[in-house]
Amino acid sequence: MRRTVRDLASALEGEPVELWGWIWNKREHGKLVFVDLRDWTGVVQVAARAGLTDHDSLQVLRSLSRESSVRIFGTVVRDPRAPGGIEVRCSKAEAISPSTEDFPIRKGMGSKALYDHRHLHIRSPRMSALMRIRSNLVWSVHEFFRSREFVEVDCPTIITAAVEGGATLFEVNYLGRKAYLTQSVQFYQEAAIFGLGKVYSVQPSFRAELSRTPRHLTEFWHVEGEMAFCDLEGLMRTIEDLVRFVVLRTEELSRRELDLLRRRIRTEEVEGEFYRVRYSEALEVLRRAGREVEWGSDLGADEERIISSQFDRPLFITHYPKEAKAFYHKSDPEDPRVTLSTDLLAPRGNGEIVGAGVRIDDHEELLSRIRNSGLNPEDYGWYVDLRKYGSVPHAGFGMGVERVLKWILDLPHVRMASLFPRTPTRLYP
Ligand code: 4AD
Ligand code: MG
């Protein structure tokens, strides 16, 4: 009977099985051939030798190199010497398709070479485990929003005007017209809440970020949510609930993968209440750490690292100055110099994982903010229009999938969390 490697654990001693997979490794000890057979559920040791394995099959196994695809027939034996405690004694083996060249991925390979061969490297059990955890994380995002009656909306990726400033826009030749790749679906979501109330999206966003930091990709997956009749407090509560749920649920769904990677998700980091600090207090924290930042400047990656390394749980920084934030942020009626905005920073120096805020809902205020930011109101025609017909207070946020994975899995770089990462220097494969 055909089995996956994972189901072998429940097979009976001596049970005949058929396995399909790839040769992960091979060792020959005299008359014995050991093959580590890999499929998408794990790796198992297959033992072949004369007397046990038919002659032709033994020849096949001896001739095949790493990553050849094979069909193995044999019986299950519990053997404490085998990795995982199970061995398959091979009676017959067939090549499905042999590797025609030496598999280029080798131990100790440098990271550039590994990313050059990303299309092959992602076969490894470790990379597969990482991608499964990512899939579990995205699944948990959907579970969260569904349980709260958010409606998923799919928004355009090709757009005509910047959401997050012109500096990081990718230009696209759209049949002879100038267009851009989206940095965020926020504006479309703002249109959608008038009919749907609470919406969310999981889509790629694009940033022509030249900053080569361990937390910037040029294409990343963006979880965004927008809510009608929502204030800053409601927004922060939703973000806190989402992040806590996603971390705990991903940990619960990913035990096997975490074991394989020998990683632990520090669930204690999200169990307690998240910290809240105003922007002006964050400048104080920085000053005490020896870093002067002028009031009004945005906090860069370095500043966020300094702040977030002083906290053991995620931290909301709130009330950023107007000049540090995009034009659409509503100003605080109690202090118009600052906005009703917040960034959520992950602890241990990880920095921003969520950007969020209350939106300007007044028509005139939005127009004047667009003008004062040096932008052309005509570029934002339909967006401004939304404020003409029954505008309501509303707020929303964006969370980067790869940033969250980098934090909870302690990855050195966000690109590790991406199947085929896009960075300023990487567009292939
Ligand atoms: O803070 P950002 O720029 O906010 C927005 O785009 C809002 N329009 C979202 C909204 O309110 N609907 O980006 C949100 C998040 C960041 O906190 C970060 O997690 C992620 O997106 N992000 C990136 N991740 C990887 N590489 C990049 N270059 C990223 N830029 C932003
Ligand atoms: Mg931001």
Image: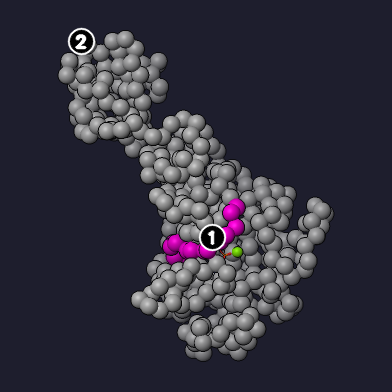
- Residue 18 is labelled as none
Task: Please name the residue that numbered disc 2 is placed on.
Answer: 51
Q: Quadrant of the N terminus?
A: top left
Of labels 1 and 2, earlier in sequence is: 2
Mark 1 CB within 8 Å of ligand 1: yes
- 339 or 97: which is nearer to us? 97
- Category of crowding for the residue at label 1, using alpha-carbon neighbours closer than 10 angstroms: few (below 14), some (14–19), many (at least 20): many
**Residue 134 counted in the magenta span:** no
Residue 62, how many percent across, how many down?
A: 26, 20
> Dot 1 lies on which element?
strand
The residue located at (22%, 34%) in the rendering is 97
Q: Which region of the structure is painted magenta?
A: 199-213
Q: Choose mark 1 or mark 2, whichever is in front.
A: 2
Up-down relation of residue 396 to residue 34 (above or below):
below
Q: Quadrant of ligand 2?
A: bottom right
Work out whether residue 409 can be spotted.
yes
The residue located at (21%, 22%) in the rendering is 60
Q: What residue type is disc 2 on?
A: Gly
Residue 239 image-quadrant placement: bottom right
- 127 or 278: which is nearer to us? 127
Q: What residue type is disc 1 on?
A: Met
The residue located at (38%, 74%) in the rendering is 174
